[in-house]
Amino acid sequence: MNDATGTREDTRLKATGAIWGCATGMLGISIPIIAVAGSGAVLLPLAVVGGAVVATYAVWKAAPSPSTESLPGGPRLRALEERIANLETISIRADETLKARFKQLEAEHDLK
């Protein structure tokens, strides 16, 4: 479950568990309220279950966020890799040029 889909499903399962855990607690609280308030509060548990169902549906049908999508593919990825390779080449050349210049300065300094 290390791929993007497995992680996303794991997150959805955790969210669903949290939703239904809260709904169970609210149902537990609504039982004494129904006993005290009478038949007028019978809609309370139905509202709790309905809300949990709607929230669960929203979690599972939500569009994937950009952060969970895979890396850019195709030409864009190749272009980025090429740019990185070019930067590495420039960096190495600049480093070699700098080292050569230091050696030249050391040689000039040693002659004096």
Image (spheres, rainbow, N blue to C red):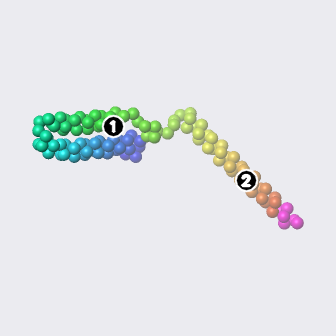
Counting from the top left corner in percent of width and height, residue 87 is at 65, 45
Q: Is residue 86 left or right of residue 108?
A: left
* Magenta-tinted stretch: 107-112
Counting from the top left corner in percent of width and height, residue 47 is at 22, 35
User: Quarter-wise, where is residue 62 in the image?
Assistant: top left
| Residue at figure coordinates x 60%, y 37% from the top left | 79
Q: Indicate which disc residue 96 carries.
A: 2
Mark 2 neighbour density, 10 Å: few (under 14) some (14–19) many (20 or more): few
Of the 4 image quadrants, the one containing the N terminus is: top left
Q: Is residue 112 visible?
A: yes
Q: Is residue 31 visible?
A: no
State yes or no: discs 1 and 2 in contact (Cβ < 8 Å).
no
Compared to 108, does 25 lie above or below? above
Residue that numbered label 1 is attached to: 59
Residue at the farthest front position: 37
Secondary structure beneath dot 2 equals helix
Mark 1 neighbour density, 10 Å: few (under 14) some (14–19) many (20 or more): some
Compared to 86, does 101 lie above or below? below
| Residue at figure coordinates x 45%, y 40% from the top left | 67
**Frontmost residue, 38 versus 27:** 38
Residue at the farthest right position: 112
Secondary structure beneath dot 1 equals helix
Counting from the top left corner in percent of width and height, residue 75 is at 56, 33
Which of the two labelled residues, at mark 1 and mark 2, occupies the earlier sequence position? 1
Circle 1: residue type: Val
Circle 2: residue type: Glu
